[in-house]
Amino acid sequence: MRALFAALLAAALLAPPAAAQENSLDELIVRARKRDAEAEYILGMKAYEGRGVPRNPSQAFRLVERAAKRGHLEAQNTFGFFLQHGVGTAADPTRACEWYEIAAARGLASAQVNLGWLYEHGLGVERSPTLALEWYHKAAALGLVEGEFNAASLLEAGAGAPPDLAGAAAGYAQAAEKKFELANYRLGLLLEQGKAPISKYGSALARYLAAARAGIPEAQFAAARLLLADAGSANAREAADWLQRAARQAYAPARAMLDEATVQYRIALQLSADPAGAAQALVWLRRAADQGYRDAQLRLGIALEDGRGTARNPAEAAAWYAKAGDAGDAEALYRLALLYDEGNGVPRDTVKARDLIGKAANLGNEDARARLARMLGPGFPQFDANDPFKGLR
């Protein structure tokens, strides 16, 4: 999660200045030759991003270094970033820290966050959560939402001090108000765990959904998980949609949940509660049934026999009843027996039907027991459910 934040922050911190769009490449080169720090910085960013010129990290490093040494504030922060991540040079977090400190001391909020990150993780400097929190708060005071989020994350973790969950929740809420949706996800986790007051921050599901709509796969997965816990066909549709979105982003837990037969079956059951969801329920039943999930095989057979969400297909229903019956499902055996007794979707075979009824009765199916009692009549010995029924000949 923090890696995702780092990627988002890097994109924000290194966004090209507006001036980059206002100067032609030739004009920038002329200015850079005259030792214009702004032009050097803009050209360096172009070389770094490959905007209008071939991407050249080494050239970017040299140009940004010149601008930084001439006192260009944004260049000083970017030069620190290049040094930290080894852009156009070998990674050197110690030197990166020195340049972040210069820009942070001059009041650049993005540099303050970067410096806080180094202190939090002990990169190029002795680890100090206290100093990290101080720099995050300074950046937050300047209005940088990443500072608020990182401060809240550090308070939640309690690195170097007891966790401050109330402070973390408040920080996440402030960041979320500024549309930093990752904060909604983290606040949702606190709400779900009962570590933040629901009356103040809303529900975990609402927070997850806000972050999910912003494309955060962890939040999409969490929202689906809560939706599935609350039965309802609308919830099942939405849960399946969020799981599929997260899976498309290669989020492994979502992919794993989608592949779980129990989850597929649960989605199918919720969808089937509404006649309008019968067709979609059939899709999920098939997924679970194909994995050998016995309950799904039975339900799929019933849907196919009755024509729920599809045209009636007693022959295919019989095949699924047989699979579920082989796995020990008494109702599936009884339903399969009725198909054979009626010749519905399978050749009529009353002997096989009676055999199947006996097996279903032995497994405790009450309908099968009652039907078997009628078939045997009063002149036959008392039926013993523990004695395997061999069939009538």
Image: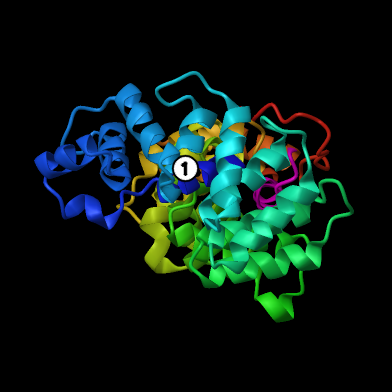
Position of residue 233 measured from the top left corner of the image (x, y, whole percent): 49, 65
Picture residue at 61% right of the left edge, 64% below the top: 140
Q: Nearer the viewer, residue 140 or 310?
A: 140
Nearest to the observer: residue 375 or residue 329: 329
- Residue 340 appears in view: no
Location of residue 169 by image quarter: bottom right
- Asked if residue 369 lies in the magenta stretch, the reply is yes
Type of secondary structure dominating the magenta stretch: helix
Relative to 98, residue 180 above or below:
below
Q: Quadrant of the C terminus?
A: top right
Instruction: Report the amino acid beneath label 1.
Output: Gln
Identity of the residue drawn at 64% across and 61% down: 138
* Residue 283 makes an appearance in the image: yes
Image position, residue 280 (x, y; %): 39, 54
Magenta residues, start to end: 363-374
Left or right position of 287 against 139: left
Residue at 69% in and 59% down? 152
349 to the left or right of 48: right
The residue that mark 1 highlights is 76
Farthest bottom residue in view: 199
Picture quarter containing residue 387?
top right
Query: Which structural element holds mark 1?
Result: helix
